[in-house]
Image: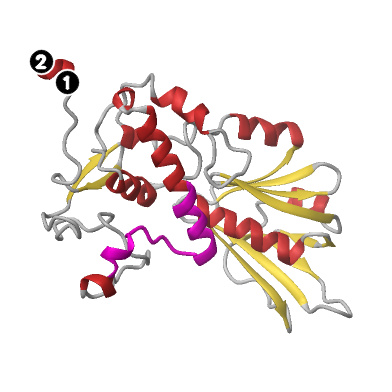
Amino acid sequence: MPEGHTLHRLARDLGHTFGGHTVRVGSPQGRFEDAARQLDGADLLGAEAWGKQLFIGFSGERFVHVHLGLYGTFLVHDEVDEVPPPVGQVRLRLVRPASATRPAGYGDLRGATTCALVSTAERDAVVARSGPDPLRADADPDRAWQRIRRSAAPIGTLLMDQSVLAGVGNVYRAEVLFRHRIHPLRPGRTVRVSQWRAIWDDLVVLMTEGVATGRIDTVRPEHTPEAMGRPPRVDDHGGEVYVYRRTGMPCHVCGRPVRTEVLGGRNLFWCAHCQPVFRSRAVAR
């Protein structure tokens, strides 16, 4: 499932390609046909992401709400010589016709979990159910902290709960916990506020870089392939990481094998040496 930085990149690309233009809206697959008919010929005002939720704004206070889910893709093509016929199961197609000053652009949405025409109130309700997004300037990290500090659930679960924290997926979860030496099964209520603020600040930096580069890189300068004299990572997810999908491979910091375990249907990745099991001082006494 795409992580939050991917949705923010997509919102940026949609805004650049279609924002401020009158667009043609269609549903070649047919599943969005009625809504597409209502939007066809409307002005597309812009797009924004909140965590893994995407909202495309149209005139008349209307929004297309998109959640890509596990298999969804939304490919945007700007300034093309010709808009090709749709290929495959295209749920939503946006077209910016060519003008005297700019060639045409188009975007095709396929395989999304959610593609729905919603009102402002419905959009606001989705946002209200979401936690703060590290990529939004208006995010309040204390909202997430109030949930974390009271919860006995593992911090690894809480970071992936979109109602606690919006936009963090399995890669950022594994990597930010490693970077702060926190075991993924440590109860949320045992995490100190200083640790939480450090995690939040780190996510802001890492995810902002992900928006800029389109990949997830989490290793510090001293652990890059060039600095360590090791081969670069070869993985379809791209990016240099510490533990994500590196089960059994040596930790870049201590050399111990990276571990994995299933939690809530998703794989955890961590280093048992660099991220020791949390032991309460009260219990130790």
Q: In the rendered view, does 252 fall on the left or right side of 22?
A: left
Indicate the position of residue 15 as horizontal and vertical percent values: 72, 59
Q: Label 2's element?
A: loop
Q: Which residue is mark 2?
A: 285
Stretch of the chain drawn in magenta: 204-224
Q: Residue at x 36, y 21 (%)?
A: 151
Q: Residue furthest bottom?
A: 81
Instruction: Provide the major secondary structure of the magenta segment.
Output: helix
Q: Is residue 150 magenta?
A: no
Q: Is residue 217 magenta?
A: yes
As measured in the structure, the alpha-carbon distance from the residue carrying label 2 to the one carrying label 1 is: 6 Å
Q: How many marks?
A: 2
Indicate the position of residue 150 as horizontal and vertical percent values: 38, 19
Asked whether the residues under the numbered discs 2 and 1 touch, taking CB atoms below 8 Å apart as contact, a structural biologist would say yes
Dot 1, how many residues are within 10 Å of its Cα: few (below 14), some (14-19), or many (20+)? few
Nearer to me, 172 or 19:
172
Residue 3 shows in this picture: no
Residue 128 shows in this picture: yes
Residue 108 lies in quadrant: bottom right
Dot 2, how many residues are within 10 Å of its Cα: few (below 14), some (14-19), or many (20+)? few
In the picture shown, does residue 187 fall above or below 74?
A: above
Q: Which residue is mark 1?
A: 281
Nearer to me, 195 or 270:
195
| Circle 2: residue type | Arg
Q: In the rendered view, does 152 fall on the left or right side of 165?
A: left
| Circle 1: residue type | Arg
Q: Residue at x 26, y 71 (%)?
A: 227
Indicate the position of residue 92 as horizontal and vertical percent values: 67, 58
In the picture shown, does residue 209 fall above or below 138?
A: below
Q: In the rendered view, does 241 fall on the left or right side of 22?
A: left
Q: Residue at x 32, y 28 (%)?
A: 191
Indicate the position of residue 162 as horizontal and vertical percent values: 48, 36
